Image (spheres, rainbow, N blue to C red):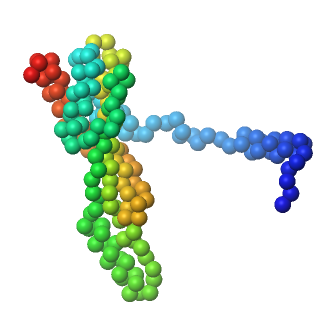
Amino acid sequence: MTRLTSGPQILALASVCLLLAGCQSMPNNLLVLPENYLSAREQQMRKYATTDEKKVVLGAAGALQDLGFTIDKSEMDLGMVVSSKNRTAVSAGQVTAALTADVACVLFGCYSNLYGKTDKAQKIEASVVINSALAKDSTVVRVKFQTVVWNVQGQVSRFETIKDSKLYQDFFERVSKAIFLEEQKI
């Protein structure tokens, strides 16, 4: 193996690398939003008729705790709350199907480790951003629920945004109640 030691060799190699990098093009759909972006955004956002961000942050944190989440980070000045909860991801049907396929494969003389790919644990994360700058006399709350699922080998098998409208609706109803109770000093 030869080493690049002279200036012209290094300059030539750098030029070739820049030339090859310049030939790359951006995908046509790089800046195109997904089709369901607006409906997902609508599901994740609500406007509240108050300008007291502190009240809304506390209401959002309380709503998350009511839903079983643990507050991981909270920044009152930035209007942000991050929380999570750990749950099992074991599905009896998935495990049964994987074990059956593995046993059948062994009987026919092949190797399969489908059980090693079955889900074991999941972490559901919720991030809330509160912003009063988007509206003049109200505060906008946006929440996003996501889940990370690990298989029995400890590898991440899925990472996805939760689209369950009932979960979002339940969260926003709890925030509304918390804000109302705080305004009424109850």
Question: Which of the 4 quarters of the picture holds residue 8?
Answer: top right
- When asked about the image quadrant of residue 2, the answer is bottom right
- Residue 97 spot, x, y in % from top left: 31, 72
Is residue 106 positioned above or below 46 on the image? below
Q: At which x and y percent is residue 25?
A: 65, 41
65 lies left or right of 186? right
**178, above or below 119, in the image:** above
How many marks can you see? 0
Between 7 and 135, the one nearer to me in the picture? 7
Q: Is 118 or 24 nearer to us in this picture?
A: 118
Residue at image coords 54%, 39%: 30
- Is residue 166 visible in the rendered image? The answer is no
Q: Quadrant of residue 179?
A: top left
Q: Please, is residue 126 above or below residue 94 in the view?
A: above
Q: Which residue lies at the image location 84% right of the left edge and 60% below the top edge? A: 1
Q: Relative to the observer, which residue lies in front, 54 or 24?
A: 54
Residue at the spot x=28%, y=46% of the render?
85
Q: Position of residue 123 (x, y in %)?
A: 33, 49
| Residue 178 rendering spot, x and y as whole percentages | 16, 27
Res. 105 in view: yes
Residue ranking furthest to the top? 136
Quick one: quadrant of the C terminus?
A: top left
Left or right of 67 in this view: 30: right
Q: Is residue 168 left or right of residue 36?
A: left
Give the residue drawn at x 35%, y 27%: 75
Relative side of 48 to 72, left or right = left
